[in-house]
Amino acid sequence: MQDKKLSDVVRAYFDAYESENRVVAEELLADGFTFTSPNDDAIDRATYFERCWPQGDAARDQKIEKILVDGNKAFVTYSCTIGNGRSFRNTEFFTFSGERIASVDVYFGAAYQNGVIV
């Protein structure tokens, strides 16, 4: 049952990101939340929202392909198409504190435009 709860938290987080609902996203993040990507090294919540949160400048269509939960951790692979038609596929590694997201590590996939890597 815990696996289902954590996968629901991941889905809610992705929904909040796609709809730019920061209030919901903030509720899903644990105190001390960190975010890591090839561009960010364990940045805190405030820096994450400043640098990484969508600012209404690009429509996006995200589709979760797979969520794998193991204890208090989850891997999520998703595809995303943004307003300019560019698409990409990423994987994110989540750790949880209870049912709140403690950290996210993003692994970028290739970006495509018209079926060609850009």
Image: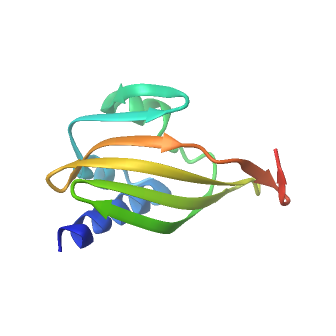
Which quarter shows the C terminus? top right
Colour approach in the figure: rainbow
Q: Residue furthest front?
A: 70
* Vertical placement of residue 38 versus 68, above or below: above
The single residue placed furthest to the left in the displayed view is 98
Q: Which quarter of the figure is the N terminus placed in? A: bottom left
Q: Position of residue 93 (x, y in %)?
A: 40, 48
Give the answer, above or below, for where 92 lies relative to 46. below
Write the residue at 24% across / 68% down: 3
**Displayed quadrant of residue 13:** bottom left
> Image quadrant of residue 57?
top right
Q: Is residue 64 above or below residue 27?
A: below
- Picture coordinates of residue 51 (x, y %)? 49, 31
Which residue is rendered at x = 42% and y = 40% of the image?
Answer: 105
Name the spot of residue 63 as percent of width and height, x first: 55, 67
Labels in figure, total: 0
- Which of the pair 9/17 is nearer the observer? 9
Tell me where residue 34 sits by quadrant: top left
Q: Residue at x 37, y 43 (%)?
A: 104
Pick the front one: 1 or 44: 1
Answer left or right for 113 relative to 97.
right
**Image location (x, y in percent) of residue 19:** 46, 59
Q: Is residue 4 left or right of residue 54?
A: left
In front of the other: 72 or 102 = 72
